[in-house]
């Protein structure tokens, strides 16, 4: 019994790390269709606009945040350093504007509230009615 | 080229509205290197040198409006005593979300890494393979159109550029008028292939060569005209592929540059590179080949018969010898991502020359790459 509980607890811990808790969020009024592929393309600068034609403002977290590292690896399938190197290439070739970096979920939510075309990600525990969660699975 | 039009467009760009959102970015490469004793390669010799490939750059981009932006990149190269140079200065107009038109001075997208070859941080080498990338027409003044779209999981990029260039090379000046190129790239998450075709009207002038060709011209004007690079058609063909599975990568490029009616041989250059990413470390191996030792003008001269053939052969062979190159370079590199936007690299290259054994050289370089 103890062992089962132990396994359960360990499993819960383990899975909370793997399926952690980032949520891709946009402005509540953003009604365009957004899927996993579009999120990935927007965060890699390959796609610049939503399906309604509006140009996306990309927001991310600083490279030393655990949430950012997790998002980059799970969604973009790249290490954060590789994502930064990739963006530096776009910036210096005039093909993109470096995503704006925020320092907290709070700041991310505030910026999204101010900008109908912003897209970012926050910890699931920070989700509130100010933002709309995009399903990307 | 319509330089006046470009200047006009750029000056509109400079008159940015006061509220314009101006972004400043920069990058720096500090590169040092040393060859084996009594050797030289890529400007390095057997005393340690910091300035050959080091560079510092600042880039400013401003949005003129939702669709229009202006970009200026000022680059100071150690090889030019760090005197700042306007590497790029162009205005981009986003016609649609898929198509962008640019005018000004920009990098010609001849190679896979063309756009970012100066940004050490963006690639895994200390220096992109010089056998392929060291061409005197990386930047041009002109117009460029870029288009990208998605078909299923595939991204398609198409581009075209027209313009003119002028550059110093081999102790002379090369100019290219009516330069054009088209490129196409097909890629998915981990695989890409690209192809490029371009052409220009090339003119090359270098005092010593011009004198020799001038003397040949007194003997036979038609043959001298064949030899000289004077508004002669030059063609560029390039293909490349890239496989990037993030934990490992493999890529290669092949280019062919030909000026048919001239004293220069057709240059074929290629490289293959492979490496893997283990945490902060990226070790890689690169092998480059350059072949450009075809002897030009001998058949054309033979057709003119004696005594011309005997009289001019030494001069023709002499010119050929100036341009002939045939070598391989084997390179091992390790990149370490020290911090975000900051990488350190160490690279060893072994250069083997098939024509002149004395040119064989080994080179050790390190680089510190930073972007902000």
Image (spheres, coloured by chain):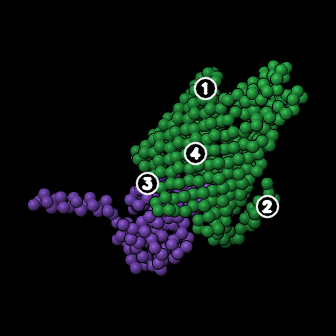
Chain colours: A purple, B green
Is residue B356 depicted above or below A83 in this figure?
Answer: above
Percent coordinates x, y for residue A94 in the rendering: 62, 58
Cα distance in 3D space between marks 1 and 3? 39 Å
Question: In the drawing, what numbered circle is on residue B239?
Answer: 4
The residue under the point 79% across, 61% down is: B5
Q: Secondary structure at mark 3?
A: loop
User: Pointer 4 indicates a residue of which chain?
Assistant: B
Cα distance in 3D space between marks 1 and 4? 25 Å
- According to the image, label 2 marks what residue? B5
- According to the image, label 1 marks what residue? B353
- 10 Å neighbourhood of mark 1: few (<14), some, or many (≥20)? some
User: Pointer 2 indicates a residue of which chain?
Assistant: B
Foreground residue, A133 or B270?
A: B270
Q: Mark 1 or mark 4: which comes first in sequence?
A: 4
Same subunit, tags 1 and 3: no
User: Pointer 1 indicates a residue of which chain?
Assistant: B
Cα distance in 3D space between marks 2 and 4? 33 Å
Cα distance in 3D space between marks 1 and 2? 46 Å
- 10 Å neighbourhood of mark 3: few (<14), some, or many (≥20)? some
């Amino acid at each position: 019994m103890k062992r089962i509980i132990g396994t359960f607890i360990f499993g819960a811990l383990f899975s909370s790390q793997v399926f952690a808790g980032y949520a891709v969020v946009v402005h509540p009024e953003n009604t365009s269709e957004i899927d996993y592929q579009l999120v990935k393309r927007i965060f890699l600068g390959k796609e610049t606009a939503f399906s309604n034609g509006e140009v996306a403002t990309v927001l991310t977290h600083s490279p030393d945040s655990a949430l950012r590292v997790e998002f980059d690896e799970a969604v973009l399938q790249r290490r954060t350093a590789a994502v930064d190197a990739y963006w530096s290439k776009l910036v210096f070739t005039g093909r993109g504007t470096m995503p704006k970096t925020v320092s907290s979920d709070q700041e991310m939510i505030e910026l999204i509230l101010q900008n109908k075309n912003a897209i970012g990600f926050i910890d699931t525990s920070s989700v509130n009615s100010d933002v709309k969660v995009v399903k990307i699975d | 080229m319509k330089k006046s039009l470009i200047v006009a467009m750029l000056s509109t760009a400079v008159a940015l509205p006061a509220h314009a959102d101006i972004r400043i970015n920069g990058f720096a490469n500090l590169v040092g290197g040393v060859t084996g004793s009594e050797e030289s390669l890529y400007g390095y010799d057997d005393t340690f040198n910091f300035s050959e490939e080091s560079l510092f750059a600042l880039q400013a981009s401003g949005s003129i409006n939702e669709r229009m932006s202006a970009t200026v990149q000022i680059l100071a190269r150690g090889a030019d005593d760090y005197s700042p140079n306007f590497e790029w200065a162009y205005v981009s107009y986003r016609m649609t979300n898929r198509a962008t038109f640019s005018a000004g001075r920009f990098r010609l997208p001849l190679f896979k890494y063309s756009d970012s070859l100066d940004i050490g941080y963006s690639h895994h080498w200390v220096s992109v393979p010089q056998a392929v990338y060291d061409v005197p027409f990386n930047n041009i003044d002109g117009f460029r159109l870029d288009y990208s779209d998605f078909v299923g999981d595939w991204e398609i990029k198409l581009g075209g550029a027209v313009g003119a260039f002028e550059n110093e090379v081999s102790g002379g000046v090369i100019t290219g008028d009516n330069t054009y190129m088209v490129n196409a790239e097909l890629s998915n998450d981990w695989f890409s292939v690209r192809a490029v075709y371009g052409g220009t009207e090339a003119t090359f002038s270098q005092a010593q060569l011009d004198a020799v060709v001038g003397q040949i011209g007194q003997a036979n004007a038609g043959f001298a005209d064949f030899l000289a690079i004077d508004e002669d058609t030059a063609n560029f063909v390039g293909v490349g592929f890239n496989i990037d599975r993030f934990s490992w990568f493999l890529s290669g490029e092949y280019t062919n540059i030909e000026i048919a009616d001239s004293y220069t041989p057709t240059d074929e250059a290629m490289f293959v590179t492979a490496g893997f990413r283990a945490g902060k470390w990226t070790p890689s191996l690169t092998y480059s080949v350059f072949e450009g030792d075809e002897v030009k003008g001998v058949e054309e001269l033979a057709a003119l018969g004696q005594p011309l053939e005997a009289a001019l052969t030494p001069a023709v062979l002499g010119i050929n010898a100036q341009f002939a190159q045939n070598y391989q370079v084997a390179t091992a590199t390790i990149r370490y991502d020290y911090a975000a936007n900051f990488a350190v690299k160490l690279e060893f290259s072994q250069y083997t020359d098939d024509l002149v054994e004395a040119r064989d050289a080994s080179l050790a370089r390190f680089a510190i790459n930073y972007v902000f």
